[in-house]
Amino acid sequence: MPVAAKDKKKVCAEESAKTRRAREKLKKKLEAFEKQITPQALEEKTIEIHRWIERHSSQRAVLRSETFSLFDENQNTAVLSKKVSDLAEQLQKDFKITPQRATNSLQSKKILQGMVASQSKSD
């Protein structure tokens, strides 16, 4: 037996008077706020922002003499977190890996993969 499309619609309870009043109050507040956004108000706010920047210019750092970039290709790496440092120390203790013993990269890779797998299981 096919069900009509309007029968499929979820039936909701009618909105209460209190909810209706709250909705109307919010609509009025939103409309009042939107009326405040005028080209003149935007221009005034722009001037206010420029004045604020000018007042606080003494606190700004001068960057003309320094060069910087957002990505420095890991030339200045971040300090290792305590968790990562502790994990690295634990790995070295558990498997006593030293640069001389880690000559076989495949063997080292398998050891590290096993350690990571066992670490993730314990988490």
Image (cartoon, helix red, strand yellow):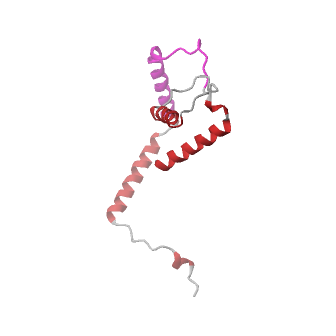
- For this orientation, the residue located farthest to the bottom is 1
Residue 49: percent from left, percent from top: 47, 26
Give the magenta part as a residue range. 40-69
Regarding residue 40, the answer to whether it shows in the image is: no
Relative to 50, say whether 30 is above or below. Answer: below
- Residue name at image x 66 percent, y 31 percent: 103
Q: Position of residue 108 (x, y in %)?
A: 62, 37
In the displayed structure, 96 sits above or below 7; it is: above
Judged left or right of residue 110, residue 16 is left
Q: Quadrant of the N terminus?
A: bottom right
Q: Is residue 119 left or right of residue 107?
A: left
Q: Nearer the viewer, residue 47 or 57?
A: 57
Residue occupying the point 50% across, 45% down: 119
- Location of residue 19 with respect to 45 vertically, above or below: below
- Specify the principal SS of the magenta part: helix
Image coords of residue 9 (percent x, y): 51, 74
Residue 103 appears in the picture as rendered: yes
Give the residue displayed 59% in from the left and 11% down from the top.
65
Q: Residue furthest top?
A: 65
Q: What's the residue at 50%, 50% (across, down)?
A: 121
* Pick the front one: 115 or 45: 115
> Is 106 left, or right, of 45 in this rendering?
right
Q: Is residue 48 magenta?
A: yes
Give 1 or 35, whichever is nearer the viewer. 1
Residue nearest the observer in this picture, 15 or 67 = 67
Q: Quadrant of residue 105?
A: top right
Task: Point out residue 112 in the picture as x, y percentages from the top left corner.
Answer: 58, 40
| Total marks in image | 0
